[in-house]
Amino acid sequence: MVTSAQQATLHFVLPCLAVLCACVVPVVLAWGNLREELTAAARRPLALLSLAIILLSSVFLLSNYSISNLYLFAIYCVILSIGTLCADKLNRPRVWWVMTAWHCFNLLNLLGGSASLLQPYRADTQGLLPTIFQISDKFGGTCPTVYEVDWCNDAWITFQLIVAFIYVVLHIVSFFLVGLKALDINVQHVRQELNESSEAQRQSLEEPTSDLQEYQPHAKKEVLQEAVEMSPPLAVQRKDAEAALEEVMADSYFARELEELRCLASGPEGERPLFTFKSGATYKGQWKGNQRHGIGRQEWPDGAAFTGEWRNNYAEGHGQFVHADGDVFIGQWRKSAAEGLGLYVHKHGLTTYRGQWVQAEQRQAALDRNWAEVSQLVEAVPRAPRPALAICWEELPKALDPAEGELDQGRAQRKRRQVESLAAYALAMLDPGAMVVEFGAGSGHLGLLVAYLAPSSHVILVEAKEYSCKVARARVENTGIGNCGVFQGTVDEFAGTGQDFGLALGLHTCGLLADAVLRLAQSRQAAVCLVPCCYGQVSSKENHHRGQGTELHMHPCSQAMAEVSFAWCAKAADFTPGKGGAFDAESPGFQTALRCMQVVDTDRLLFAQERSGYKGELGLLDPGCSPKCSVICLRPQEAAAREPAAEQKVR
């Protein structure tokens, strides 16, 4: 039979063991080094209160009043205090709201809420303080004899009553601290979500490249920007987005090392040492086989760099790109192109865009912005009227016909119209007896026709490719034209001969070749009539050196357009026609490309005007004959003052 003393012992020994387990096990599992964590917790007010409550709970754990179950209050409060300590360590918004509710219920339990959810039985219990008063009144300040033990006396009851007051006060203070903590941390969390973007943007604006080494991508946290010069735009009028993406990638930073990577032996997955490509670019980061995959940083020889997330060799996820000229983009990427939320800062701070990025919208927004900046300059350039020239190709020697041997009749007609249209401009600018040089002549379609129609002039076809020169010489012989010769070599090699000339021609001079021809013509004070091609090369990251006076990133070269972002315009000017060169000259895509061609060519005209005193006009080839149809017409100031007596002869 269990004695009263044994029952009294069970009433506080078992709860003590339960509380001991509740205290030690979670703390050890959660913190490991208990001593260090308790020392750190003692420096925080809320943690200090919780530790004090745990210590004071021992007074009620020693209670021998089974009718009051005072030890239950101690068990609840110890577990609650341990939870508070854990919440103080975790410091999560949701955890604090849970702890606030728990403290509220426990406070009701202490102050006398008979409906307290934390009181599992004995619903007649009125709380800690009412219980202490009840015991004191019921037994007259003495221990009840039913469970009396040696150490229970009036002093013990009085001591418990005093501790109960302190205990309740500590819980009230703890409740308010927990509630304030819950409010504070949630307010901070909301503020952080609202202000994080603007803070990142301000940092980027102040020091766009200062934190590049330390930059680490974090999902949903980086704010973004428009990559105006960072990634080449999609081909205009491409209906197949994936095909357009592949075309863009072929000339982008991110694709330069793809061929080398495909041939690279598969290595261990994960972090690897710095890897240097044949191009001089370097990559340090994570790999999967022979693919850049994970977090990594790649730098290119011209100073451009990307730091962020990679997926199967593509920049995909979050990352920061710093262009060689200083432009910065921070944001989301897909297939090595900016797509999603992003922040873009122009190198001079003149252009800043924050928001969502979609590749087509990104390109069009950049083009619209550039056009707004330069439209007045472009529209102010005089337009050269298209001269009339009617040629009956069937009456000319077959060797002069550019459509000779062409099976596609549509393509044949377009080639005829290209040559005929530019020849009309050339003849309108040609002085009788002048020396004419066609650069990038190929097999000589344009130069031969000009030589045939202007027999008093002498035409030199300049071409670097040996095979094309052989074809051109054969065509000269077959036509019997005596005022046309062929020079095999580059622009610089021809310039080295010292040969003067009066008119420089070029039909679809590729990229910087147009600029090399313009520089040489200006040095000889010669007129220029040419149709540029491959506009994207003027802003290419690779050095397409085509002759003296051309260099990497030389555009924009005029002072008037010095602050214009050129890469998007140059790329968009490279309109992609359909099969056989067919295209719709009235389509929005071509009209955008034409506008971009004229932006680049206006820069060339203005540079010639600023440096050499030339006067220039922009013309157009016959509509629909070629997507590259912008004609640059330049004359020295003296020649422009007089109207040339054009010699035109149609046989």
Image (spheres, rainbow, N blue to C red):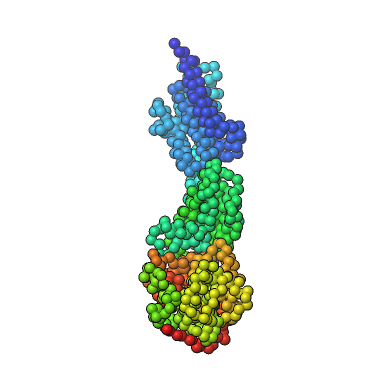
| Picture quadrant where residue 55 is located | top right
Q: Viewer-proximal residue, 638 or 199?
A: 638
Q: Tell me if residue 6 comes above or below residue 375 in the rendering.
A: above
- At 55% from the left edge and 23% from the top edge, which residue is drawn? 155
Q: Is residue 168 visible?
A: no
Q: Viewer-proximal residue, 74 or 212?
A: 212
| Picture quadrant where residue 591 is located | bottom left
Q: Viewer-proximal residue, 270 or 240?
A: 240
Image x and y of residue 206, in percent? 58, 60
Q: Tell me if residue 83 comes above or below residue 639 in the rendering.
A: above
- At 52% from the left edge and 85% from the top edge, which residue is drawn? 456
- At 37% from the left edge and 68% from the top edge, which residue is drawn? 408
Image x and y of residue 414, in percent? 40, 72
Q: Tell me if residue 162 comes above or below residue 388 in the rendering.
A: above
Image x and y of residue 489, in percent? 57, 70
Q: Viewer-proximal residue, 268 or 374?
A: 268
Quadrant position of the C terminus in the picture: bottom left
Q: Is residue 87 visible?
A: yes
- At 41% from the left edge and 33% from the top edge, which residue is drawn? 116
Quadrant position of the N terminus in the picture: top left
Image x and y of residue 584, in percent? 37, 70
